[in-house]
Amino acid sequence: VYGAKDIELSPEAQAKIDRYTQQGFGNLPICMAKTHLSLSHQPDKKGVPRDFILPISDVRASIGAGFIYPLVGTRSSPLALVGESQPKQVHP
């Protein structure tokens, strides 16, 4: 994946993969969440690093959207909304 030589699954991530597979979702495509600064999980490794171990801390499913997404390192969910939306803060 993106130059990684391997992945390292946390016990929680492996348990969720097993559960999703058992539920029939094992063939869904995977959508990667990563930092925009690097193709690795480490933003200080700019560009296209090679031969690193990609730590998968958790795995979540968006069944309605039809994909599974791993959380890499300490990366939070790409689908989470934080606070109030920006359009509500626009004043005429």
Image: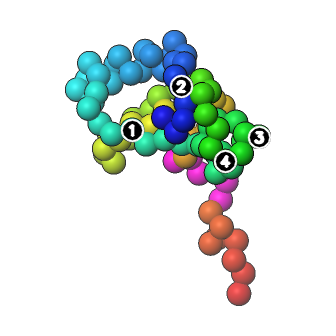
Q: Is residue 63 above or below residue 55?
A: below
Residue ID for mark 4: 47
Whichever of callouts 4 and 1 sits on the residue coming sooner in the sequence is 1
Q: Nearer the viewer, residue 10 or 89?
A: 10
Give me the C-alpha separation between circle 3 and circle 4: 9 Å
Give me the C-alpha separation between circle 2 and circle 1: 18 Å
Q: Residue 2 appears at what percent x and percent y?
A: 52, 39
Residue ID for mark 3: 44
For discs 2 and 1, the disc positioned in front in the rendered view: 2
Identify which residue is drawn at 48% across, 20% down.
13
Q: List the single residue furthest toward the top.
A: 11
Give me the C-alpha separation between circle 3 and circle 1: 24 Å
Identify which residue is drawn at 61% across, 34% down.
50
Q: List the single residue furthest toward the bottom.
A: 92
Q: Which residues are magenta?
A: 79-84
The C terminus lies in which quarter of the figure? bottom right
Whichever of callouts 2 and 4 sits on the residue coming sooner in the sequence is 2
Residue ID for mark 1: 30
Q: Residues within 10 Å of mark 2 (few under 14, many from 20)?
A: few
Q: Residue 47 appears at what percent x and percent y?
A: 67, 47
Q: Is residue 37 above or below residue 52?
A: below
Is 9 situated left or right of 20 in this image? right
Q: Residue 18 appears at what percent x and percent y?
A: 35, 16
Q: Which mark is residue 5?
A: 2
